[in-house]
Amino acid sequence: MPEITFKQLAENSPFEDRIARVNEIFKDCNAIVFFGGAGVSTASGIPDFRGKNGLYSKPDPEFIHYQPEYLLSDDCLRDNTQVFFDFYRKNLDTRKYEPNVVHKKMAELEEKGKALGVITQNIDGLHEAAGTKNIVKLHGTADKCHCAKCGKEFPVDFVMNMKEVPRCRCGGVVRPDIVLYGEMLPSGAMDKAYQMIGNADCLVICGTSLALPHIQALIDSFIGEYMIIVNASPTKFDAYADVVFREDLAEVFARIEVE
Ligand SMILES: [Zn+2]
């Protein structure tokens, strides 16, 4: 095996050089794993909860008396159930959005046997819609709902197409399968994420600043050959990445070659 010297292409290297390097790396790999955050969804027009155009930046007069985190917490669901669903229906209806070039390229690379799959912090169903089969959804999914009392599953339309609190025949509240503030991550999701990253030869970080300690620990577990970071702001892992992009995710992924 030839000796590999670490030569980073940081965000100030010419864009074309970095794109060429990513395509070279992808040719060499057959176990690429994508780790995605809000930036992957915003490229489809879904507002970022914390981002520039997110819910924090333009307070809605209807919910002015509540903190955004509270509106998506288990406390709010339990104590202010009507407010929870009013907010949820107004702000987290992801049904009308379509996958973008980022979702599509990830799915194509999996289909060609180049990528193992996607680990995402997003709750929309756009990776599934793009055709990705192997997805770890760390924060659950807004595509499904269930009765908090008996566990019966309900379609998302059931929750979205009414004004009152959605209830099961058993009397339980029907809630989305997402992880609310104050709740644990779904059982097994972190284990699966560790497993996928443990098998990766290339880790591509997309649209997330990796700020949370349990996410940093997960990324730290990566021992594969290459790391690529595409994020608008710096991350703790930039110094260890082979290639770093601050450019738009869609702009970068549009240039990825799938053979
Ligand atoms: Zn029920």
Image (cartoon, rainbow, N blue to C red):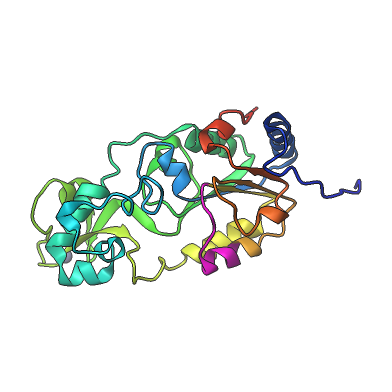
In percent of the image, x 77 and y 46: which residue is there?
8
Percent of width and height locating residue 190: 50, 65
Describe residue 46's horizontal placement relative to residue 204 as left or right. Answer: left
Residues rendered magenta in the picture: 207-218
Percent of width and height locating residue 29: 71, 42
Q: Which of 250 and 171 is in front in this view?
A: 250
Q: In which quarter of the image is residue 210?
A: bottom right
In percent of the image, x 48 and y 44: which residue is there?
133
Percent of width and height locating residue 155: 22, 49
Residue 46 covered by magenta stretch: no
In percent of the image, x 62 and y 59: which residue is there?
236
Q: Quadrant of ligand 1?
A: bottom left
Q: Which of 258 and 64 is in front in this view?
A: 64
Pick the quarter of the image with the C terminus.
top right
In this rendering, does residue 149 appear at all?
A: no
Q: Please say if 194 is above or below 244.
A: below
Percent of width and height locating residue 209: 53, 55
Q: Nearer the viewer, residue 80 or 169?
A: 80
Q: Which residue lies furthest to the right in this view?
A: 2
In this rendering, does residue 169 appear at all?
A: yes
Describe residue 197's horizontal placement relative to residue 104 as left or right. Answer: right
Count of numbered labels shown in the rendering: 0
